Image (cartoon, grey):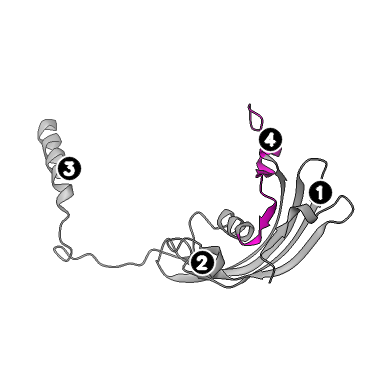
Amino acid sequence: MKRKINLNEVTDKEPIKVDTEIQPSLLELPKEEVVSSTPFKLHIEVYKKPVGYDIYGRIEGEVELICSRCNKSFKEKMRKSFYYQLMPTSEITGGEIKAGDLDVKFADSDALDLAEVVKEQVLLNLPLKPLCDEQCQVPDVPFEEGSIEEDKRWEKLKTFKDKLKEKEK
């Protein structure tokens, strides 16, 4: 299992191509977003440019998420191809960001950490509102008065609301 690529080994004529598997323990994914995951398969190709590198890759794996509607866990497969340019920080220029600038990453390291590449791609591809199913509905749980203790923080708002009603009369 290869974990890092030495960028100094990439030449104009000889790109580096790696197929590896990254274990979930190396990814350190946020538990509030990802309950668990399978190991991720990674295929990555690094090509040297006159300045910087072109990075092409593909990740495959599965994550377990919590549905934002019903609060149940579900599994979602991730198969994602990606591309970005890796440039030295000396190439950072000021000014306006253009659409093409979004595929550029800046770093001065001589090594490319493959676990970081996978973690970044997983986080970029997580759904904003995870749903176990498009037809998923919020569970219909009957509310019984007094079944939940009232939150004291709402007392001031309730008092304010009552004052507004009085003023309207």
> For residue 71, which quarter of the picture?
bottom left
Contact? badges 2 and 4 (CB < 8 Å): no
Residue 45, given in percent of the width and then of the height, sits at: 78, 58
Residue 2, given in percent of the width and then of the height, sits at: 69, 68
Query: Image check: 145 left or right of 10?
Result: left
Question: Where does label 1 land, which residue?
Answer: 48
Q: Could you give the CA–CA distance between mark 2 and mark 1, rounded to whole angstroms? A: 43 Å
Binning the other alpha carbons within 10 Å of mark 2 as few (below 14), some (14 to 19) or many (20 upward) gives few
Q: Could you give the CA–CA distance between mark 1 and mark 3, rounded to whole angstroms? A: 61 Å
**Of callouts 3 and 4, which one flags the residue occurring earlier in the amino acid sequence?**
4
Query: Image check: 89 left or right of 46?
Result: left
The type of residue carrying mark 1 is Lys
Contact? badges 2 and 3 (CB < 8 Å): no
**Of callouts 1 and 3, which one flags the residue occurring earlier in the amino acid sequence?**
1
The type of residue carrying mark 2 is Asp
Q: Nearer the viewer, residue 87 or 55?
A: 87
Question: Where does label 2 land, which residue?
Answer: 133
Q: Which residues are magenta?
A: 89-115
Residue 59, given in percent of the width and then of the height, sits at: 67, 64
Numbered label attached to residue 90? 4
**Of callouts 2 and 4, which one flags the residue occurring earlier in the amino acid sequence?**
4
Numbered label attached to residue 157? 3
Could you say whether the residue bearing mark 2 is in a helix, strand or loop?
A: loop
Where is 118 relative to 104, above or below? Answer: below
Q: Nearer the viewer, residue 99 or 39?
A: 39
Could you say whether the residue bearing mark 3 is in a helix, strand or loop?
A: helix
Q: Nearer the viewer, residue 45 or 150?
A: 45
